[in-house]
Amino acid sequence: MNKEEILKRMRTAIVEGNKDETEALANEAIKQKLDLNDVIDKGYVPGIEKVGDLWEKGEYFLPELITSAECMKGAMKVLRPELEKAHVSARSKGKVIIGTVEGDIHDIGKNLVASMLSANGFQVIDLGADVKLEKFVEKAEAENADFICLSALLTTTMLGQKKVVEMLKEKNLAGRYKVLVGGAPVNQKWADDIGANGYGENAMVAVRITKKLTGE
Ligand code: B12
């Protein structure tokens, strides 16, 4: 199998949600000593982007999206040790701290956003769900992050997003991090009202906005 064939099959495997094939191809790429940044950028990422498009068009539903995101995670799990071993860091577009805010255990959407960002070249630090608000700021500081992504699915917990923005202001860190908000009860108006830098209605939009904010 030549490189082009491998990249094409990677795209297809992600779109079809074929985990075994996705991982087998990652191993094949390692065996053939292919440029792993190319493998991610030209093989897997176009696959997950296609999945996002199909989802936005209403042709794919949540189960397909989750399966493809899992495939993507599986591929990255195979590739990551090799990338580290070779001291070739994947071309990171920026560092993202993400989590679902305190009091809220919904994490499906947050996980999708984290996977999509990671698949699109961002270094993602996922703090999980029900995350103490101070932890977002502490972790962003400790990791020298570029973005803080806050997910909230409850009308009560979305207030946590506002509090994080306020916390940043209190600590004179306003503008230091780009804050993105999302979740079912959240909208652009809310993002504007609380002074967040962006709102994404779904994972693909989250990627688009994050890329835009990095100047891409
Ligand atoms: C699944 C679900 C659950 C599961 C969660 C499982 C899990 N591990 O996540 C369980 C059963 C545990 C659950 C529990 C509860 N739930 Co619930 N849940 C849902 C449900 C049906 C789907 C949520 C979901 O996963 N959607 C699919 C994902 C893909 O979509 P998403 O989360 O919106 O994420 C996308 C975008 O919003 C965006 N996005 C998300 N986060 C971010 C972040 C950033 C930065 C960006 C840019 C974008 C972004 O991208 C994502 C991917 O495309 C919703 C209904 C709904 N319509 O949302 C109710 C819902 C959110 N739940 C609700 C409630 C009330 C509860 C409970 C309080 C119920 C109870 N009485 O115990 C508890 C909450 C407990 C707690 N403290 O958190 C209400 C909230 C009402 C409100 N207005 O506050 C809803 C709306 C149901 C309803 N109509 O009443 N729930």
Image: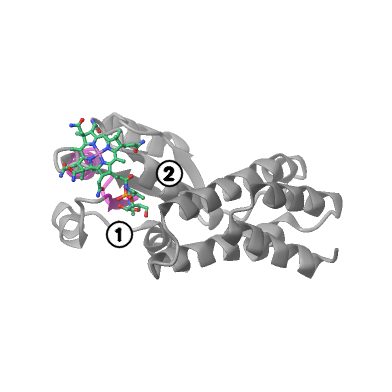
Would you say residue 14 sits in the magenta stretch?
A: no
Query: Which residue is at a point 22% across and 45% down the rendered structure image?
Result: 165
**Quarter of the image with the N terminus in it:** bottom right
x%, y% of residue 69?
52, 50
Q: Secondary structure at mark 1?
A: loop
**Label 1, ligand 1: CB separation under 8 Å:** yes
* 182 magenta-colored: yes
To which quarter of the image does residue 187 belong?
bottom left
Which residue corresponds to mark 2? 111
Q: Nearer the viewer, residue 152 or 150?
A: 152
Quadrant location of ligand 1? top left
Checking the image for residue 201, the label placed there is 1
Quick check: 17 left or right of 151?
right
Neighbour class for label 2 at 10 Å: few (<14), some, many (≥20)?
Answer: many
The residue under label 1 is which amino acid type? Answer: Glu
Q: Which residues, given as a range, are shown in magenta?
A: 160-183
